[in-house]
Amino acid sequence: MIYTVECSFADPTGEAEWNDFYSLEKLPALISVSGFHTSQRFKALSTGCPVYLALHSIDNLDVLQGDEYRQKGGGNFARWQQHITDWHRTLYGGLDRAPAIGEDEHLATSAVGPEPLIEMGLTPYRMPAVALEKCPEVRWLAKLGRPLEQGLERLPKGVHLYVPMTNQLTKGSISEEYDDE
């Protein structure tokens, strides 16, 4: 299953520190939780969506309701909470693992159907929402492994484009320091 977390951050003076916290501390803590398999963070290039998107491959909803998740990865936002806006969490079925998006690649998403992604020459993956906010009810993901031929202003309506902020973390890609806590 794919667990998505989206948000924007409303404090420009603290945004770099927020990004360091999320990318360097929170993602490694999350990937150390039993049932988490991959984690990657993105920043939107397009408008009309939250600025930040994190994609996590997890076993099921029980992972997010367990004590280990609450202790290692859930919450931990007290310092940042007042600045987090447009925050959404959804659990999707349809994919076992999120695609790894490389440094020179983009993630394209659509909530309006697969057609806009297909028209861009991409292969969309359908993900129906199964838990949490369920918004959007169905989302399509696609990996754009080449430069965007048209400008952002010419993206199909309902398509959002993201650049990776981190490599995709997997269980084996981090130090085991979090497993000892």
Image (tube, grey):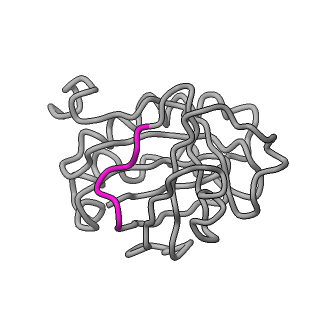
- The one nearer the camera, 47 or 74, is 47
Which residue appears at 49% of the width and 47% of the height?
54
Rendered location of residue 87, percent (x, y): 59, 60
Nearer to me, 87 or 102:
102
Residue at the extreme right of the image, as rendered: 153
Residue positioned 18% across, 48% down in the render: 34
Image position of 100 (left or right of 161)? left
Magenta stretch, residue numbers: 94-100
Q: Position of residue 106 (x, y in %)?
A: 58, 38
Lateral position of residue 52 relative to residue 26, left or right: right
Q: Looking at the picture, does residue 24 appear above or below residue 99?
A: above
Q: Is residue 95 magenta?
A: yes
- Rendered-image quadrant of the N terminus: bottom left
Residue 158 is situated, as x and y percent measured from the top left of the image, at 71, 64
Is residue 140 depicted above or below 8 in this figure?
A: below
Who is closer to the viewer here, 104 or 67?
A: 104
Residue found at the very far left of the displayed protein: 180
| In front of the other: 30 or 2 | 2
Which SS type dominates the magenta stretch?
loop
Residue at the image point whose x is 26% and y is 48% from the top: 36
Question: Residue 79's spot in the image, x, y percent?
Answer: 55, 43
Q: How many marks?
A: 0
Left or right: 74 with respect to 4? left
User: Which quadrant does the C terminus fall into?
Assistant: top left
Residue at image location 60% in from the left, 68% down from the top? 111
Q: Is residue 159 magenta?
A: no
